[in-house]
Image (cartoon, rainbow, N blue to C red):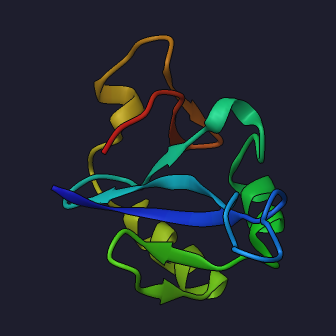
Amino acid sequence: MGTNYYTKDKTNECECCGRGVENIHLGKSSAGWNFSFQYNDGKYYKNFEEMKRWLKDKVIEDEYGHIITLDEFIAFINIKQKENRNHANVYKDDRNFVIDGYSFTNCEFC
């Protein structure tokens, strides 16, 4: 069990009804594991540094609707980096990989 984190892409948002907003999965935090980033085919970012820059003007929220600031998100990920288990190292295949010491996956997980 863990907690998923998201932001929203409002590029296609309808001004009248608000439809067209897409949830973008940033990753998942699970007890005892490093934060597992969702790579999203590299569409938005290709590493943690790019993700931080890309998120500067976006709202970050968990799957329960709790909003956190970018600074809180970064601090949380840095704490999770001290955990002993890295998803990409444990579940090695062509969809899971490590970039600059951070665990990324290019498959959907929940």
* Between 6 and 88, the one nearer to me in the picture: 6
Quarter of image, res 42: top right
* Between 9 and 60, the one nearer to me in the picture: 9
Quarter of image, res 99: top right
Quarter of image, res 106: top right
Compared with residue 88, is residue 72 higher up or lower down, i.e. above or below? Answer: below
Q: Residue furthest top?
A: 94
Q: Residue at x 52, y 86 (%)?
A: 68
Q: Residue at x 28, y 52 (%)?
A: 33
Residue 98: where, in percent of width, then height? Answer: 55, 33
Q: Residue at x 83, y 66 (%)?
A: 53
Q: Residue furthest front?
A: 16
Residue 88: where, in percent of width, then height? Answer: 41, 30
Q: Residue at x 19, y 61 (%)?
A: 31
- Which quarter of the rendering shows the N terminus? bottom left
- Which quarter of the rendering shows the C terminus? top left
